[in-house]
Amino acid sequence: MPAIPSNKPYRVGRSRTGLGLFATKPIKKGTKIVRYFGPLLDSKKKKDDAIENKYLFELNGRWTIDGSVRENVARYINHACKPNAESDVKPRKRKVFIRAIKKIEPGEEINYDYGTDYFKAYLKPIGCKCAACEKKRKKKRAEARAEKLRLKAKAERKALKEAEKQKAKAAKAKANYSEQAKQKLNGKANGAKLNGHSLNGHGSASKILAARSGIAARPKPGQSRESRASA
């Protein structure tokens, strides 16, 4: 890492994306923190136009700063979708300064938005790891877990309701079966009671049936109604 003068309000340190630039002193809003510098590349020259790396800072359609040199401390500043600094580009002077857009506290990482083109080319394919995007991903993961738990609870409630329904259905079927068995037993008992009244010393079965039907028994041959009555 490059040596940084003690009077500078920043240091190079470890970040979630590798190395980053961190404030060592309070930095007021609007303060020019550090200059982004390096050799100027002319796009009209094939040799310059062929150079490719992650630290190229385009000033305009012709001039680009190659910030890959070790002395360029500003190259350690990471991208953020919700940054605390911004790039102050001065195309005519061919200079770029990183300026604070809000108060930055000691220990806080300095960051700025690299722009749409850089984001699409380098960050989007691997996923942006800035604090804002990490927070967004964490929120989505929490929402996904909550949705999973909600669906699980819903499935459990549905299963419990179905189990209770099946239990009630089984209880009803059992009650119906018991009632039918009871009625069958009562029917058999009534039949046995009816059979117990046959004869019992009161005449033949035909007399009993005739008496129940209200029809008098026929007289024996040669017997008058009077004699039948006295008998």
Image (spheres, helix red, strand yellow):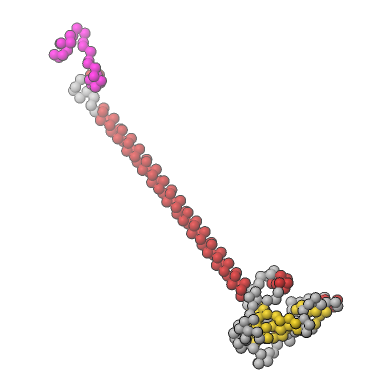
Residue 228 within the segment the image draws in magenta: yes
The residue depicted at 80 percent of the width and 79 percent of the height is 63
> Residue 211 in the image: x percent, y percent?
22, 20
Residue 212 within the segment the image draws in magenta: yes
The residue depicted at 48 percent of the width and 57 percent of the height is 156
The residue depicted at 40 percent of the width and 48 percent of the height is 168
> Residue 217 in the image: x percent, y percent?
22, 15
Q: Quadrant of residue 192?
A: top left
* Residue 203 horizontal side relative to residue 175, left or right: left
Image quadrant occupied by the C terminus: top left
Which stretch appears magenta?
208-231
> Residue 32 in the image: x percent, y percent?
68, 86
Residue toward you, 67 or 210: 67
Q: Is residue 106 visible?
A: yes
Residue toward you, 174 or 13: 13
Residue toward you, 221 or 18: 18
